[in-house]
Image: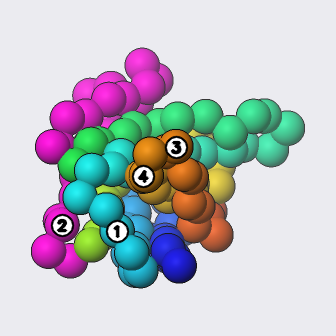
Amino acid sequence: QVQLVESGGGLVQPGGSLRLSCVVSGSILEINIMGWYRQAPGKERELVASITSRTSTNYADSVKGRFTISRDNDKNTLYLQMHSLKPEDTAVYYCNLKQGRTWNNYWGQGTQVTVSS
């Protein structure tokens, strides 16, 4: 059984920073892809950033240059450092793990990020 637990969300002013963390427990395979997704009210869930087990990264155009995804395999933890936050970054952020022959998806419970003055 795989579990993902996010933390680090909150209320921040425009231009501010936050760091999200996601601790993964359970059976984690050597080859996997981890990522952060977000879902704003009335919108579909979208990929924010992803990182492979070989640390190859991918970012949504809307966050390039402002967000950085990283992982600490020794701690089984995924991070998302967010800078220059904008009101449009407001959403519930979800941690995701893909692994296995059929790329099974595992999700965290989500953490709210609100960017507002």
Label 2 and label 4: CA atoms lie apart by 15 Å
**Of label 2 and label 4, which has the lower sequence position?**
2
Q: How far apart are marks 2 and 3 (CA)?
A: 22 Å
Q: In this view, does 98 lie above or below 19?
A: above
Q: Measuring 39% from the left and 38% from the top, which residue is drawn there?
A: 49
Label pair 4/1, CB-CB below 8 angstroms: yes
- The range drawn in magenta is 54-75
Indicate which disc residue 116 carries. none
**Furthest-front residue in view?**
101
As helix, strand or loop, the secondary structure at mark 3 comes to loop
Q: Which amino acid does label 4 sit on?
A: Gln
User: What amino acid is at disc 2?
Assistant: Asn
Rounded to the nearest whole Å, what is the CA distance between mark 4 and mark 1?
8 Å
Q: Which of marks 2 and 1 is nearer the N terminus?
A: 1
Examine the rendering and report whether any part of residue 19 can be seen.
Answer: yes
Give the amino acid at mark 3: Thr
Which of discs 2 and 1 lies nearer the camera? The answer is: 1
Q: Identify residue for label 2.
A: 73
**Is residue 117 a member of the stretch shown in magenta?**
no
For image coordinates 60% across by 45% down, the residue present is 38
What type is the residue that disc 1 sits on? Ile
Q: Give the residue at mark 3.
A: 102
